Amino acid sequence: MKYRYIPAFVMLLAGLVCCILSVVQGWPVMTSLVALVIVLLVFYIIGQIAAQVIGRVHAEHMEAVEAEKRRREAEEQRRQEEEQRKQEEDAQQDENEQEDESGEEQSE
């Protein structure tokens, strides 16, 4: 939808150039009109192709950005899970050490 004006812009720009050239060259009116119609049709098709290519490239770029974002989120989540697991292991190890110390004091 963003690129719907590209074909019209390309076509009208080419038509303007064609009109200017026909006036400067002094072409007869019928020759100028035939050339203008041909130029408008050809450049409209070129504009349509350009708009589709640009749209596809933009869509692929957005997909790549989204994939990178999802990858970063997954990496961050994995990192947080590792940190949490490490903290739990440290807490468990501290509890075990405290139990060992209290067990040694009771045996003495």
Image: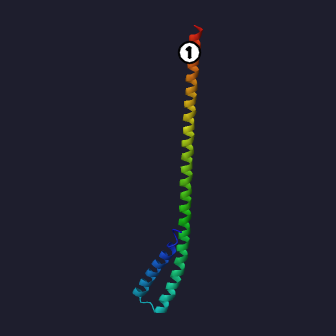
Identify the image quadrant of residue 89.
top right
Q: Is residue 28 left or right of residue 63?
A: left
Taking depth in this image into account, of 46 and 56 the one nearest to the observer is 56
Please, is residue 50 above or below residue 26 in the view?
A: above
Q: Residue furthest left?
A: 24
Q: Position of residue 71 (x, y in %)?
A: 56, 47
Taking depth in this image into account, of 17 and 56 the one nearest to the observer is 56
User: Three-letter amino acid code at disc 1?
Assistant: Glu
x 56%, y 15%: residue? 101
Identify the image quadrant of residue 59.
bottom right
Please, is residue 38 above or below residue 59 in the view?
A: below
Q: Position of residue 108 (x, y in %)?
A: 57, 7
Taking depth in this image into account, of 90 and 106 the one nearest to the observer is 106
Taking depth in this image into account, of 41 and 21 the one nearest to the observer is 41
Quadrant location of the N terminus in the rendered image: bottom right
SS for dot 1: helix
Q: Position of residue 103 (x, y in %)?
A: 59, 14
x 52%, y 77%: residue? 43
Q: Residues within 10 Å of mark 1 (few under 14, many from 20)?
A: few
According to the picture, the residue beneath numbered tag 1 turns out to be 101
Please, is residue 76 above or below residue 64 in the view?
A: above
Q: Residue furthest top?
A: 108
Label total for image:
1
Please, is residue 74 above or below residue 45 in the view?
A: above
x 39%, y 86%: residue? 24
x 54%, y 31%: residue? 87
Q: Position of residue 92 (x, y in %)?
A: 58, 26
Colour pattern of the rendering: rainbow
